[in-house]
Amino acid sequence: MAFDPLQERGIPLDEQVRDWRELNVTPIDPDHADPYTRCRIITMNGIETEAISFSHQLARHCPDTELKQQLACIRYLEAQQQKAVNWLLPGLASVLETTIAYEQVAVDLTSWVARMEPDPYLRQAYEFGVLEDFDHLYRYANLYEMIEHRKAEKIVDRLTEVMPGRPTYLHHRDPVDNVREPYDRTRTEPLSRLHALTIMAAEQQTMNFYMNVGPMYMEPIARRLYQEIGLIEEEHVTHYESLVDPGESWWEMLLNHEYNECYLYYSFMETESDPKVKNIWELHLGMELEHLRLAAELFKRFDGRDPDQVLAAALPPPVTFEPNKAYVRDLLSTQIDCTTLGTGYVREAHERFSKMQEAIMGGEQPPSERVIDDNRAISGQDYRFEVEAAVSR
């Protein structure tokens, strides 16, 4: 039977606060954990971070003290959830190892969303972005081999390939060409809303991560590569956030956020292979059901509509982390030469794109190309991990 979170009882709000012992979760084993367990953790950290940021923005635009207090209570609980989720990551992992895991999330989560997306325009947006994240994975994997002398295949297992995508230096576009057309909130499928929120949150988390960790390296090439790809992640956040209809009210956006959290916790509870982590997804789902109920009440109170007018009657099929090797290879063969122009896509460089390239490159080789040349000089060849038939270098 389909799971309808609006019809399920959650954990009462006054029973959700956890003490330090409960929040001090046992991290996953970096050497033996399922790579997709780590991907689910990274995804949910991004989702919770977005929920907290959105709640703060809503509170800053809310004049009612009582409502601010209610938002503060739920936001604190979301912050506890975020801590529990993010602290599942092992402290033994280096920044670069976590970076490679972030890019694996970007590749396989965005690929899955693109495959499931019913709207052709939205699907194109996800397909366009995934080829860029795929190339970021390749660049970071070469940096990892060069400065830590280890191979990314240990992190991604045989689930995600590592090889060139759309070259990173071609991702630098004029900012106006990163804005897409939004979906129409009156006509779009409920699933499309969930997809847009999910990928926006995931990319925003990656952007924030690179903004903060890039300066932690002493190696000049590492600092420069994080700087370059960090700028591109800002482009990606612009790309994905512009897909969301700006005509949604604050209370409709809150409702969508809470529903999406229920959807993802339920999805990961259903697909998780680690029993300890699965228990956390189940616990957080119980909490989010109550957050959703309260958001639904606010939506009815301030928008004067029933949540069923916006949300799906039941949750869609679970979001699934699974290999997308053949799918990505197909995109590489058909869309690698795409760029953007206005809110659409073209296959040739145009004046605005060329001017941006000249401005950002400054006549020098970009870090994303330099890291490949440097690793070839040290290792004899660039690093790739191709599970399918190898392509010529």
Image: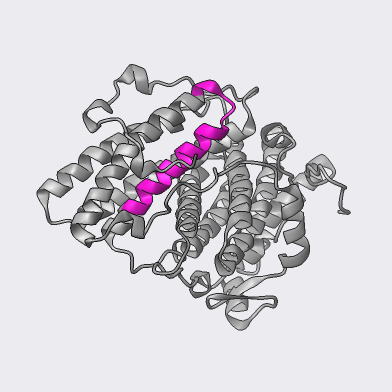
* 30 to 130, vertically: above or below: above
Q: Which residue range is magenta in the image? A: 255-276
Q: Residue at x 39, y 55 (%)?
A: 311
Image quarter (top left, top right, bottom left or bottom right) of the C terminus: bottom right
State the residue in front, 315 or 219. 315
Specify whether residue 222 is painted magenta: no
Q: Which residue is pictured at 63% across the width and 29% down the height?
A: 34
Instruction: Give the percent coordinates (x, y) of residue 226.
Output: 56, 49
Q: Position of residue 47 (x, y in %)?
A: 43, 44
**In the image as oriented, which residue stretches furthest toward the bottom?**
351
Quadrant assignment, res 13: top left
- Relative to 339, 238 lies left or right: left
The image shows residue 306, relative to residue 94, as above or below, that is: below
Closest to the observer: 123 or 135?
Answer: 123
Q: Residue furthest left?
A: 65
**Camera-side residue of 170 and 11:** 11
Look at the picture and state if 261 lies above or below 305.
Answer: above
Colouring convention used in this rendered image of the protein: one colour
Is residue 42 rendered to the left or right of residue 337?
Answer: left
Residue 259 inside the magenta-drawn segment: yes
Residue 164 relative to residue 83: left or right: right
- Tell me which residue sits at (59%, 68%) in the image: 120
Q: Name which quarter of the figure residue 160 lies in.
A: top right
> In the displayed image of the protein, which residue is found farthest to the front?
1
Whether residue 169 appears in this view of the structure is yes
Q: Main secondary structure of the magenta part?
A: helix
Residue 107 location in percent, x, y?
63, 49
Residue 164 visible within the image: no
